[in-house]
Image (cartoon, rainbow, N blue to C red):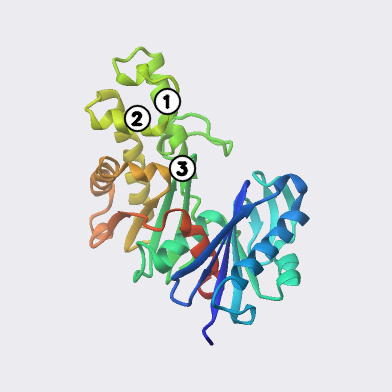
Amino acid sequence: MGDQVYLGVDLGGTAIKVGLCDVEGNLLSTYEGPTGTEHGSDVVLENIAQYARKIVSESAYTWEQVAGVGAGIAGFMDIPEGFIKLSPNLGWRNVPVKRILEEKLGKPVKIDNDANVAALGEAWAGAGKGYNNLVCYTLGTGVGGGIIVGGRIYQGFNGMAGELGHIPLVPDLEAVDCGCGKKGCLETVSSATGIIRMAKEAVERGEHTSLALVESIMAKDVFDAAKTGDETAIRIINRAALYLGKSMAIVSVIVNPQRFIVGGGVSKAGDILFEAIRKYYRECAQETSQEGVDIVPAILGNDAGIVGAAGLNLRS
């Protein structure tokens, strides 16, 4: 078998996921093992190398057929140099990931932000396949994002492009502090954390809502309540969707994507969220910039990061 394959690494705080992809972005096999964060960066990078060789040895391919390795990592980094400046969830500071992995694996290595590689995965082999210009949102504990222009990740001057969760949108009188140190970011209202916060505040105000009966409110509880007609829950979801739609309207006159893709745990709420986002996008977006543009759910789920990382050597 003479075909080349690409190896992707999704480096998380507790688990490392590795995957093997062909040149079309098809995921051929996956493997998951513990990160070993508590043992320091040297052990983690050695684990990556071991998992990479293991997945290839158990596949129909040889190590010689691996054309490149990519890794998606949460944190602040010098992407061209492959250098992690700070990764809070790994406890890393100033780690030359690219150099060390290239020494261990003997293959070209590229790294990028985890949200960027998830966007690239969806663009290459997921909901954005066949589209060259995309913007992806990841709605989870925070709001992540990635911008694909001409089929490639757009990173900006110093890698901050696509930080969609930190678009300042919420009016000052309604704004709350964001984890980034600013106030009123999209993340404060449209993430799972933001939705939970708004629900708890409504209960504390004494609003008549079924959420008052939930001992520990999660974002899913808010969506479930909204689906039963709970007015408080509906208002919260609409507020989250309003700011997502507004942010897309802003992005649409800057990047003019063909498609917005929304993934992450919150996106699993389905139509009740997507219909509201589309409504507010149509209301807020400049007419010409929204022509032919659609908003769709991501389809790769937890595999997006692996696939996108594998694609870094082809499409970044």
Could you tell me how far apart the alpha carbons at marks 1 and 2 are, in whole angstroms? Answer: 8 Å
Amino acid at the residue labelled 2: Val
| 118 vs 33, nearest the viewer | 33
Q: First in sequence: mark 3 or mark 1? A: 3
> Would residue 50 be found to the left or right of residue 6 on screen?
right
Give the residue at the far top of this rendering: 206
Q: Is label 2 in contact with label 3 (beta carbons under 8 Å)?
A: no
Whether pointer 1 and pointer 2 mark residues with C-beta atoms closer than 8 Å, the reply is: yes
Residue type, label 3:
Gly
Q: Amino acid at mark 1?
A: Ile
| Residue 215 figure quarter | top left
Total marks shown come to: 3
Asked which secondary structure carries label 2, the reply is: helix
Residue drawn at (23%, 28%) of the image: 228
Rendering coords of residue 52 (x, y %): 64, 66
Which residue is under mark 1? 217
| Image quadrant where residue 239 sits | top left
How many residues crowd around disc 1 within 10 Å: few (fewer than 14), some, or many (20 or more)? Answer: some
Q: Which circle's residue, 2 or 3, is located before the other in the chain?
A: 3
Res 208 seen here: yes
Q: Determine which of the numbered discs, if any, sits on residue 222 in the image.
A: 2
| Residue at mark 3 | 140
Label ID, residue 304: none
Percent x, y of residue 231: 25, 24
SS at mark 3 in the image: loop
Q: Is residue 311 visible?
A: no
